Image (cartoon, helix red, strand yellow):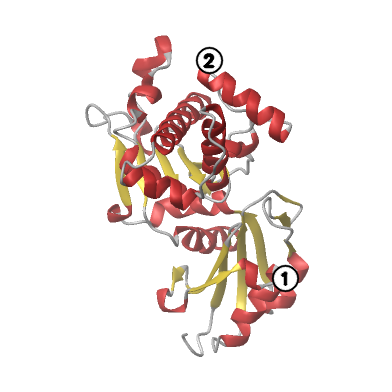
Amino acid sequence: MPKNLNRITLVADVGGTNTRIALAQDGTIDRTAIQRYANRDFDSLHAVIQRYCDASSAGQITAACVAIAGPVENGTGHLTNLNWSIDHASLKQATGADTVAVINDLQAQAHALQDLPNSAFEKVLSLPAPRQDPQSHGAKLVIGIGTGCNAALALTDASGVRVPASETGHIGLPVRSQEDLDLMLYLQNKQGFASVEHVLAGSGLETVYQYFAQTAGQAHSLSAHQIMAAMADASDPIARQTVQITVRLLAQLCADLALIHLPYGGIYLVGGVARALMPYLKPCDFAASFYAMGRFSKVMERFEVALVHDDYAALTGCANALDGLRS
């Protein structure tokens, strides 16, 4: 790790499964300082951050920002899929920083978009023709699917980038067919409520697979990793059915959010599940489901969709969010 830097920022991206921590100077992430920790090895986020700081020879940390996979209110963040929390006081205690921030992880992803290289993006859907209107640099929507699911909107104006928080992953599952309705009723009976995250997150793949297996009279289940492996080698028709409906529901979520937010600057998919699904978006007709919005189908052609490959983008977003606080 770097030594004796004058202005050091600590940034952390806390997911339901792993925590990534790094140091930044003048808003630039030091990639050699990135460390990844399995959350199961710690009893609190404070312990993870303390471990990193104890191992670091960076000197005085002047600012710190944590992006957390869960809701943040009044400076306190709670992980949705893990019984951890962090607030300004504990972050200051763990890092010794004077300036601290706690934000949602999708807010961090949205803050990062402006600084990611073109090589970080893989097109899913392109515009039929180059955009000529000034809205090409308009709102950008980030949709994250991994251990959990959420979305965030990046709004750019003369004052900079603003990213309102949301908990989109916990809205109701879109229903447009009998198959969707049957799945929704199954989830509602099992979970008490059928949310987007119940299908699109990694555990959602497992739940959907179990549903289709039960429907077929087969009492077995697979992990998300096993489902994707079975999809890759075409060894399991239930895995294919699971991925097919997951891709369709992801497309429907993207389409619904596109009409709500009008992200003419693009829609960006992030997270491990998004990357795992990427090879199957075209075979499973993501585009057809995205454009199937009735009389607004032509409007849907105004939204680009891309996958973000940078696994550390949220760290850059944390650094950018701190820069916004300082400006």
**Image point (46%, 86%), residue name:** 2
Identify the secondary structure beneath mark 2: helix
Relative vertical location of residue 1 with respect to residue 108 in this rendering, above or below: below
Residue 73 placement (x, y as % from top left): 74, 50
Which quadrant does the C terminus fall into?
A: bottom right
Relative vertical location of residue 169 with respect to residue 74 in this rendering, above or below: above
Front residue (pair 279, 62): 279
Looking at the rendering, which quadrant does residue 310 occupy? bottom left
Residue 69 placement (x, y as % from top left): 62, 53
**Residue 182 appears in view:** yes
Q: Which residue, given by chain and number where applicable, does mark 2 sit on?
A: 178
Give how far apart the Cα atoms at labels 1 and 2 are.
Answer: 43 Å
Residue 43 is marked as 1
Relative vertical location of residue 135 with respect to residue 40 in this rendering, above or below: above
* Mark 1: few/some/many CA within 10 Å (<14, 14-19, 20+): few
Select label 1 or label 2 by which is in front: 2
Looking at the rendering, which quadrant does residue 171 occupy? top right
Residue 98 placement (x, y as % from top left): 69, 74
Identify the amino acid type marked 2: Gln
Lower sequence index among marks 1 and 2: 1
